[in-house]
């Protein structure tokens, strides 16, 4: 019979659970058909992450072609698409895919399972996106964790899944090309490709694996030291590849651990592996609390009276708040679809504690702008920053944006890169340019209120208000 492997957010040909298992299962008389489903509603929204994803998809399709695995596209409603598949492939008997444990993806998985339920097709959903799936890391009493530190202890103890190698030779031998039966899908794919800008040159598996190699052999050793400084390329910048599945999280884990085995200095790598565990942790939290995109995890903080002010919100989005590090961060996001982790925390704290605005506004804006948008991590990060989430931290953890700037961008290099108006501002004033005397403003070619805004709020006033707001609720 025919075995189908369905690609989704796992656009690669290395360490791929569904594909590896599908290929391994093939017997003499069998055939392998690679599938991609195009949701017709995709055309309704187009953001940076769609653009980035389509670029990755194109590279994947080309690579699969090269390796002798032609991809077949289906489109229409889920029901239409899969009925069409069944009609065209009369001997379809196995269906492999990597599951999404949360959000819209999980809903779609369920629809597919329901669809095939009454048929003779055997379904093989595989855990693949995380190192450990949401239900693999449990307390002794079988409950899921809510606090990272104890989750992480348990996570570390579990045996890690091994690399899911694909027998590429066998894959090619069994792969079939019936694309002429799937013209509607092919047209939908071509349309999709016309919408992408082509701006994300470095998308895809090959670049992702190169980046992993390059990080592992060099920057990883200074990760612990450098990762908080946005002006340095201290982090791996692998998140867009992990999001699209161009690089597998397992492969990242094993590459790092193998490197570690050869070296005595373990600090950087250890810290890095903990970050991979955060990714698993938030996946598990979102699995446990599916309503957390809209609702605070901590009950007492539900229904807070957030500030509603379109103009303030717009200044935050555009990076025109008068707080240089916040502005640089937001402009980084707007320009490259990615933001440094330290800054994600700073701008999220700023929106919720300095502007007293609803964290959901921020979560949604990140969704629109990030190429690595991962609902679980983003929701987790935003709820953490607004002190409404899983973090054990008290509500009075409020970042001081100016102090963050002084600590993590002391020379102002990052600020100057993204806020060119401040390019010639002396380092002494770079974190609070409104303090520049008039003649310095003139010399720097940066008149406050004209070339660069005054701070839109007073941090210490807003800090007090935030404390009151949370106290009222707590
Ligand atoms: P590295 O420091 O090199 O870390 C390696 C990998 O570990 C990352 O690629 C990521 O997959 C994972 N990781 C690191 N930190 C975290 C974390 N705190 N939570 C979960 N996973 C982590 N990450 C996303 O992938 N998508 C998001 O939409 C997202 N939204 C965020 C929103 C907020 C408000 C905050 C505070 C954090 C968010 N993060 C998100 C987590 C983190 O900021 C990014 O994963 C990281 O900046 C990606 O850069 P990197 O690959 O260079 O990270």
Image (cartoon, grey):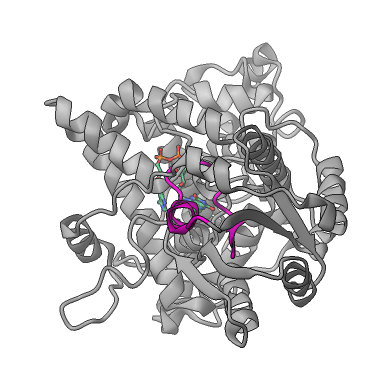
- Of residues 435 and 422, which is closer to you in this image? 422
Which quarter of the picture shows residue 204? top right
- Of residues 349 and 380, which is closer to you in this image? 380
Is residue 173 at least partly visible in the picture?
yes
Quadrant occupied by the N terminus: bottom right
Q: Residue furthest front?
A: 29
Highlighted range, magenta: 1-28
Q: Position of residue 101 (x, y in %)?
A: 48, 69
Left or right: 416 with respect to 131? Answer: right
- Of residues 310 and 158, which is closer to you in this image? 158
Q: Position of residue 76 (x, y in %)?
A: 82, 68
Left or right: 300 with respect to 163? Answer: right
Which quarter of the picture shows residue 363? bottom right
Left or right: 10 with respect to 235? Answer: right
Q: Residue furthest left?
A: 264
Quadrant occupied by the C terminus: bottom left
- Whether the magenta-drawn stretch holds residue 11 is answered as yes
Q: Residue at x 72, y 72 (%)?
A: 86
Q: Residue at x 29, y 67 (%)?
A: 392
- Whether the magenta-drawn stretch holds residue 402 is answered as no
């Amino acid at each position: 019979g025919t075995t189908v492997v369905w690609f989704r957010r796992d656009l690669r040909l290395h360490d791929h659970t569904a594909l590896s298992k599908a290929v391994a299962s093939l017997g003499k008389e069998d055939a392998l058909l690679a599938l991609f489903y195009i949701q017709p509603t995709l055309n309704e929204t187009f953001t940076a992450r769609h653009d980035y994803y389509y670029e990755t998809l194109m590279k994947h399709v080309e690579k699969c072609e090269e390796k002798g695995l032609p991809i077949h596209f289906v489109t229409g409603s889920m029901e239409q698409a899969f009925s069409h598949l069944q009609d065209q492939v009369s001997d379809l008997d196995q269906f492999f895919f990597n599951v999404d444990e949360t959000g819209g993806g999980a809903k779609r998985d369920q629809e597919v399972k329901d669809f095939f339920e009454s048929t003779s097709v055997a379904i093989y959903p595989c855990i693949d996106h995380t190192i450990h799936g949401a239900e693999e890391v449990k307390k002794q009493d079988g409950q899921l964790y809510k606090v990272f530190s104890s989750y992480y202890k348990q996570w570390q103890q579990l045996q890690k899944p091994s690399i899911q190698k694909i027998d590429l030779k066998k894959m090619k031998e069994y792969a079939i090309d019936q694309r002429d039966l799937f013209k509607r899908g092919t047209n939908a794919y071509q349309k999709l490709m016309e919408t992408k800008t082509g701006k994300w040159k470095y998308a895809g598996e090959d670049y992702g694996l190169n980046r992993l190699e390059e990080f592992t052999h060099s920057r990883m050793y200074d990760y612990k030291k450098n990762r908080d400084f946005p002006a340095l390329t201290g982090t791996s910048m692998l998140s867009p590849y992990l999001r699209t599945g161009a690089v597998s999280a397992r492969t990242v884990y094993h590459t790092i651990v193998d490197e570690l085995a050869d070296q005595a200095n373990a600090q950087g790598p250890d810290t890095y592996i903990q970050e991979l565990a955060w990714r698993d942790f938030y996946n598990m939290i979102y699995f446990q609390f599916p309503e957390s995109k809209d609702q605070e995890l901590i009950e007492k903080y539900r229904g807070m009276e957030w500030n509603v002010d379109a103009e303030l919100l717009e200044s935050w989005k555009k990076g025109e708040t008068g707080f240089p590090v916040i502005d640089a961060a937001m402009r980084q996001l707007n320009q490259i679809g990615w933001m440094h982790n330290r800054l994600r925390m700073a701008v999220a704290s700023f929106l919720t504690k300095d502007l007293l605005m609803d964290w959901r506004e921020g979560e949604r804006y990140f969704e629109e702008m990030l190429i690595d948008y991962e609902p679980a991590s983003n929701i987790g990060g935003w709820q953490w920053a607004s002190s409404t989430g899983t973090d054990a931290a008290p509500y009075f953890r409020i970042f001081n944006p100016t102090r963050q700037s002084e600590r993590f961008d002391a020379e102002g290099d990052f600020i100057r890169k993204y806020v060119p108006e401040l390019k010639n501002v002396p380092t002494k004033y770079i974190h609070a340019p409104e303090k520049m005397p008039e003649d310095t403003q003139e010399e720097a070619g940066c008149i406050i209120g004209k070339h660069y805004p005054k701070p839109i709020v007073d941090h210490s006033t807003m800090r007090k208000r935030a404390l009151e707001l949370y106290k009222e609720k707590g």
